[in-house]
Image (cartoon, helix red, strand yellow):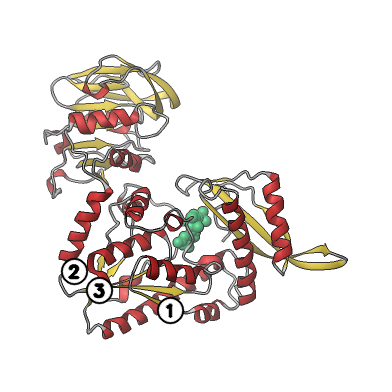
Amino acid sequence: TILVLDFGSQYSHLITRRLRELNVYAEMLPCTQKIKDLTWRPKGIILSGSPYSVYAPDAPHVDPEVFELGVPVLGICYGLQEIAVCHGGNVSGSDKREYGHAILHVKDHHSLFEDIDDFQVWMSHGDKLSELPKGFLVIGTTDNAPFAAIIHESKPVFGIQFHPEVTHTTQGKKLFHNFAINICKCQQNWTMENFIETEIERIRSLIGPTGEVIGAVSGGVDSTVAAKLLNEAIGKRFHAIFVDNGVMRLNEPQQVHDTLTEHLGINLKVIDASDIFLGKLKGVTDPEKKRKIIGNTFIEIFEEESAKLDAESGGKIEYLLQGTLYPDVIESISFKGPSQTIKTHHNVGGLLENMKLKLIEPLRELFKDEVRALGTLLGIPDELVWRHPFPGPGIAIRILGEVTPSQVEIARKADYIFIEEIRKAGLYNKISQAFACLLPVKSVGVMGDQRTYEQVIALRAIETVDFMTADWFAFDAKFLKRVSGRIVNEVAGVARVVYDVTSKPPATVEWE
Ligand code: XMP
């Protein structure tokens, strides 16, 4: 295992990703982690970049023990500066920030640069090393940075000013390979095949021969993969609950039911609670209120159903399954200051508060693409594995204004047509997320000789890597014409279709 210590750079998690792509297991912890408190011994340590300047009074600093462990250490950007400061070097705020591409001239094909010649690197820093720390040698330079890559004369301690974890650095992957596999001697045994085997064993011994587990499924990738894993481990002793909240997409509850039971053999209970949800949403127009109502109602219903199942099983249910992924774990442990809440993403968070259950989270070490690979290995159909994300509050936050059964019907039909056309055009996998929004405004139209006065549908399609920033998808005009024609003709209640051409930021992905 490689330990990645996070100093708060926006790229920190990418370091872990790149190592996992090499089938090397890597775990990220906040930079404040004390080495003596680690329960495992890393084979190598990477110090990430940071938005801080090393001499800032509130700057985070590494536990000096890191250099005493005797394992290789690689400092990236701020990590390099930390290494320098810990070894008596100097760092200066440079007069200009360096941001963008540079060419790294490899001075010494030391193990870190084995089989690597001069290559393009990505720089993003304010401070830089102004003086070589004692006992270090320069192994790479750029036109702006005379100490762009350094190594200790006798200890396996390396520092680089550039970011090998971003794809703009052309030899980044090779550099991580050299560090993790050649220098740290890590094994490349982190594969999803191995993961399934060890995770199923772990689940079985955790639950024991008679214990039972309950979990909510939404029809999304994460909860389905988690459920299938439990089903493989303990069969019918895992109980999945699917709550139809009345604001899913057209035919979705039926599809979820069919895939999970017929295709995947999961023990599933479907609760049709649409009337309850729609009843509570009546008259509500505030987006945050809608989210809260849906989140809380879901929790109430799930708790009720799990109590019933527990009684039926004779009190054997001990665990609650959650499909938490590694990015959520990172989010909760990473080193950062306070940030502002733009919207509350209400899902099943808070489920455990009133329930006397222990938590089981088989995906908490995995990134999304690892979950997808796992899903495919577990026999989950491609259509589900590659499904666009769908928010917990469903189309309730895509119907602006009050959510009523007739508004749900309009929004559902329009969304269905849009996605159907996207699939037909072979664009589904090029787009990260697409949906229709129903706006609470009416507009005049003419159909045949009749005046119409009906609502507006806004289409949204985006491309993004991480959903933090996103760009709108550039459909060709013919495609948009076809979709708008179909929606206005086939969906009663819609007189006009518009396409949303706003990126995130400043807009968010969802309209509410
Ligand atoms: P925003 O609108 O915040 O969306 O730019 C980013 C991603 O998050 C999804 N989203 C949600 N997911 N519960 C969820 O589970 C929510 O309340 C929620 N709000 C937004 C959104 O669909 C997009 O993928």
Dividing the picture into quarters, in which one does residue 4 lie? top left
Q: Give the percent coordinates (x, y) of residue 491.
A: 69, 67
The answer for how far apart the CA atoms under marks 3 and 1 are is: 19 Å
| Label 1 lies in ligand 1 vicinity (Cβ under 8 Å) | no
Instruction: Kindly identify the residue that appears in the image at 21 percent across and 79 percent down.
Output: 316
Label 2's element?
helix
Considering every residue shown, the one lying at the far right of the view is: 449
The answer for how far apart the CA atoms under marks 2 and 3 are is: 10 Å
Question: Within 10 angstroms of label 1, few (less than 14), some, or many (20 or more) residues?
Answer: some
Q: Mark 2 points at which residue?
A: 207
Dividing the picture into quarters, in which one does residue 440 lie? bottom right
Q: Give the percent coordinates (x, y) of residue 416.
A: 59, 62
Depth check, front residue: 36 or 362: 362
Task: State whether residue 381 is above or below residue 28.
Answer: below
| Label 3 lies in ligand 1 vicinity (Cβ under 8 Å) | no
Q: Name the residue under label 1.
A: 271
Q: In this view, does 467 lie to the left or right of 57?
A: right
Q: Which amino acid does label 2 sit on?
A: Ile
Task: State whether residue 80 is above or below residue 418.
Answer: above
Q: What residue type is labelled 1?
A: Ile
Q: Is residue 147 left or right of residue 272?
A: left
The answer for how far apart the CA atoms under marks 2 and 1 are is: 26 Å
Q: Are marks 2 and 3 in contact (CB under 8 Å)?
A: yes
Q: Do the residues labelled 2 and 1 touch (CB within 8 Å)?
A: no
Q: Mark 3 points at which residue?
A: 237
Precedes in sequence: disc 2 or disc 1: 2
Instruction: Kindly identify the residue that appears in the image at 19 percent across and 29 percent down.
Output: 182
Precedes in sequence: disc 2 or disc 3: 2
The C terminus sits in image quarter? bottom right
Closer to the eye: label 3 or 1: 3
Q: Do the residues labelled 3 and 1 touch (CB within 8 Å)?
A: no
